[in-house]
Amino acid sequence: MIQKAMLGSVALSAVCCLSASADWPAFRGGPDLGVAQESTLPKELNAESNPLWSAELPGRGPSSPIVVGDKVIVTASSGAKQDRLHVLAFDAKTGNQLWERQFWATGRTATHPTSAVAANTPCSDGERIFAFYSSNDLVCLDLDGKLLWYRGLAYDYPHVGNDAGMASSPLVVGPGVIVQIESQGESFVASLDRATGETLWRVERPREASWASPTAIVDDQGNVAAVLVQSKNRLSALDPASGEEFWSIEGGVDLIPSAVQQGNLLAVPFDGLTMFRLASDRTKAPEKLWSSNKLRPGAASPIIAGGRVLALNRGGVLAAGLPDSGEVDWQVRLDGSFWSSPVVSGDRLYCASDDGVLQVVPLEGDREQISSLPLGEAVQGSPAVADGALFVRSDRHLFKIGDPADR
C-alpha cells in the first residue's frame, strides 16, 4: 500500500547541505559516498600531535558523527535499558559542548550486546537535524537544539524491530527524510515531511531484517532520481516522490554494508560485490558488469575512488578492484578487524579498527607505509571529514584528528 502526498512540482534534489563542501551531513558524508571533497587531512598520524581535542560522551553509540557548519552532531543512548536518547552538539574548532537534548525511547530498545539504540547515524538538511534510533524514534531539531517535531514510529507500527536492533540511517531527499525500517515483523520504507514529520508516503517491504542504509541514486544533473534499498533477497530502486518501485533485482544482498554510486557506476554488496552500469534514465534497470567474492566487503561499506573500487572486509583485508572488470589490482592487510566504514581523502584512505586504531593507507605508491594512531577505545562509527580534520567517535569520546596548526 502506498500513501501518496501532494508533492507538487518540488525538485527532488540531493541533500540540501551536500553543496557545502565543509559539511559532512549524513552517513558516509556527501554525494561521493565515503570520499571527502578536500585533501588536507594529515598524511601521517602520531600520538604527539593528535587528537587535537576529545570530548566526553554519555552512554553508547555505534552511530557516526556528522558535521553541519561549525557544529559536530553526535547521538548516544544510555540507561540500563538503553532507553534514554541523546543528541549532542560540539564546537568543531574547540570541542566545547554547545548543547545536549535528551528524550525517552518509545519503541523496542533490545539490541545485540555489541550494538546500541544509537546505532543509526543522524542526518541534516543544513537547517534541521534528524536523529533516528533503533527504537524507531525520529527526532527533528534545529541547529540550536530546539525540538521541532518527534515521531515515535513504534506507536503507529508496534511490530517493527528485532532482537539485534535496527541500524539503517536516514536520508534527506527533496521535501522528505527517508527511513528504512525492515525487520521480521512490520517492514516498510517511508518518507516523512522534513518540516512537520507527517508521512508523505509509506511502502511495505519484505518481512526480513536489514541494517543497510538507503542510498540516493543521482542523475547527471545532480538530482536524486531514485532511492536504492537493500533487502535480504532483493535490491530495489524507489521513486523518491511516491515510493513506487522503478526496478528490482533478485539475489543475495548483503544486509549491513550499503551501496555506493559514482557517475554511472553502482557498486552493491550483492553476490559478494556487484558492479552495475546505471542507465542514463535512472528509472530503468541497470546493466550488471561483474560480481566478485574477492571484493566482498565486511560490515564496512565499499568506496569508489581513484579509479578503483575499495572493499574492506571484517578481517582487515583492504582490496582494490578495477571498476570495469572486478579484477583485484592490489590488496593489503591492515591491523585489526573492522566494523567502521573507511573514508578517502586525496590519495589516502582512513579507517578505524574495532579496537580503536585509526590507520592511514596510501592508495598510490608504497601501500605498506601505513601510519596509525591508537585511540585507546573501541570504535564502530565511521569517521566524518570536515575543514581538514577527521571526527571519530567511540562510546566514551568524540575525537578530532587533524593538523596540529589548527589546535
Image (cartoon, rainbow, N blue to C red):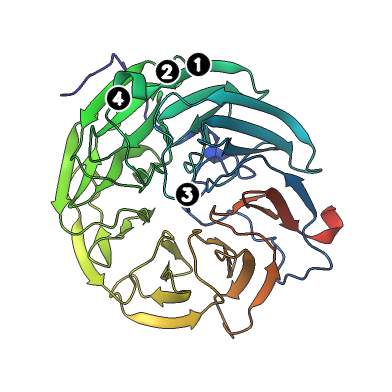
* Relative image position of residue 129 (x, y in whole percent): 56, 29
Element at label 2:
loop
Element at label 1:
strand
Figure quadrant of residue 39: bottom right
Q: Residues within 10 Å of mark 3 (few under 14, many from 20)?
A: some
Asked if the residues shown at circle 3 and circle 4 are in contact, with their CB atoms under 8 angstroms apart, the answer is no
| Residue that carries the numbered disc 2 in the rendered image | 197
Viewer can see residue 125:
no
- Label placed on residue 158: 4
Farthest residue, direction front: 80
Figure quadrant of residue 17: top right
- Label placed on residue 149: 1
Q: In front: mark 2 or mark 3? A: 3
**Would you say 134 lies left or right of 90 here?**
left
| Residue that carries the numbered disc 3 in the rendered image | 115
Asked if the residues shown at circle 2 and circle 1 are in contact, with their CB atoms under 8 angstroms apart, the answer is yes
Viewer can see residue 371:
yes
**Mark 2 → mark 1, Cα distance in angstroms:** 6 Å
